[in-house]
Image (cartoon, coloured by chain):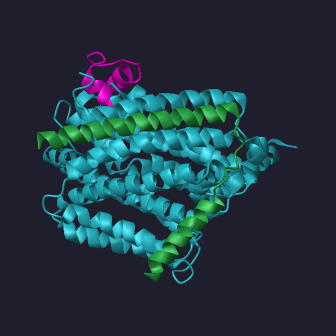
Amino acid sequence: MDFFSVLYYRFKKVWKAVRLYLVIAGPGLVVMIADNDAGGITTYAATGAKYGYHLIWFLLLLIPVAYYVQEMTVRLGAVTKRGHAEAIFESFGAFWGWFSLLDLMIVDWLTLVTEFVGMTAALSIFGVPAWLTVILVVLLMSIIVLNGRYWTWEKIALGFCLLNLIYIPAAFMVNPSLSEITSQGLIPNLPGGLNNELFFLLMANIGTTIAPWMLFFQQSSVVDKGLQEKDIKMGKIDTFIGAIITVAIAIFIVIVTGTLLNGAPIDDAATAAKLLMKTNHYVGAFMAVGLFDAGLLGAICISLASSWAFGEIFGWAHSLNTKVKEAPWFYISFFFTLATAGVVPLIPGAPLVLITLFVQVVAVTLLPAALVFLILLLNDKKTMGEYANTRLQNIVSTLIVVSIIILSTMYGVSALFPNLFQ
Amino acid sequence: MRTINQFFSKIREINQRYAKPTVEMSTGVKFSLAVLRIYLFLLVLLMIYKFITVIKVL
């Protein structure tokens, strides 16, 4: 075979793999990018503003953390064809099942409120009143969900994921110093030593990387998409690419705020956007648009995670491939969660700070349980067969899970008792 | 009333369906679940303590 024939053959092989990936891609990308929700954007903006580029190395460490946890849901979903809630009920009984389901409902609803807070704050920068934002979001999500096809929903969600990349041009527009980024950001260091404030921010970054809803969402998404055991390899690649993109976006946000707002007190991403607008109008606008998109993506995934979980347990039809007539309770629970959460930011004097605090605390009760169940389920050789965790996977995932549990518990407890670790 | 009854009968049905855990209850699984129970129990205690102290301040 001549050189060109070999090249053509290899190109065809790669192109076939790319096309296969494009068919299977979705759950991993969507869940990972939606992980950068409104709360996540706030955390990254605060990280950059407070410590400049110094914690970029820490964000890079979160790529394997996010990947190892989420890829387990791909295997579990593809092999068992069950969502995470159903898997817990069936494997561990009704007690742990109800505990997980009710906890998921509470934490999802509270997180959804924070997404609406982020979205209303983002659009208020452009003069859009909060009530109009809520109505627009509910309408937009109705159009996305009610089309009756998982495929269409996923492609629209991927479109919103693309919009999340808006932080990349924003980072280039602020002309950051590449030498400073590499010298300060890529060498592990703890600026100012490990004090309470830094520790809290590190824990917040971990907390925003792995959230309970992500486990439930990706597994149900894999099932709804109909991924089979043969698709696991591509599903894992999808998750890995998603993990890289989500951390890359986080790093670009840190670069933006680290360059322009270094030292400024940032309590939320909307404040960061307003401050950025004073320095560079377009960068501020990009930050606000990104915040809205992040909240929207988070809301799309979180409300679906709840509805899927409810449908699995109550035996309702619970697929995006079904019409409203065929799965009324699935859609009713979806819109009920969405509408009730959307109303909260519109209530004058609503305890939004308390709700944010509650999200952290309640998530701490659910996350360790969901992660422990995940590892136990992945070790059930009777169900998982050849896709059960290997010894190496068990060592890595157990180390990651134990670290997440310890740090997220400290994060939750420090939210309850702010002076405890001082 | 009928809807409430239906709802509770559905809950009973779910409880019956998932009454027996299917996962093999090895020592590792039993240990993990026991640690999880203790962890959650302590966490709930902390939350109750926080709740009481907040109420007292109010």
Q: Nearer the viewer, residue A90 or A46?
A: A90
Compared with residue A222, is residue A318 higher up or lower down, i.e. above or below?
below
Q: Is residue A186 magenta?
A: yes
In percent of the image, x 23 and y 54: which residue is there? A285
Magenta extent: A179-201
Vertical order, B33 against A419 (above or below) = below
- Residue at 12%, 39% (x, y): give it: B57
> In the depicted view, which residue is nearer to us: B24 or A128?
B24
Where A403 sits versus A327, above or below?
Answer: above
* Colour green belongs to chain: B
In the rendered image, residue A133, in percent from the top left (x then y), is placed at: 25, 67
The picture places residue A169, in percent across and down from the top left corner, at 35, 47
Please tell me the colour of chain A: cyan
Residue A247 is left or right of residue A114, and the answer is right
Question: Which of the 4 image quadrants contains residue A2?
Answer: top right
- Which quadrant of the rendered structure holds the C terminus of chain A? top left
Q: Where is residue A39 shown, x and y percent of the image? A: 32, 47
Q: Is residue A237 visible?
A: no
Instruction: Answer with left or right where residue A289 lies relative to residue A68.
Output: left
- Residue A250 % position (x, y): 38, 40
Q: Is residue A7 magenta?
A: no
Identify which residue is drawn at 44% across, 70% down: A333
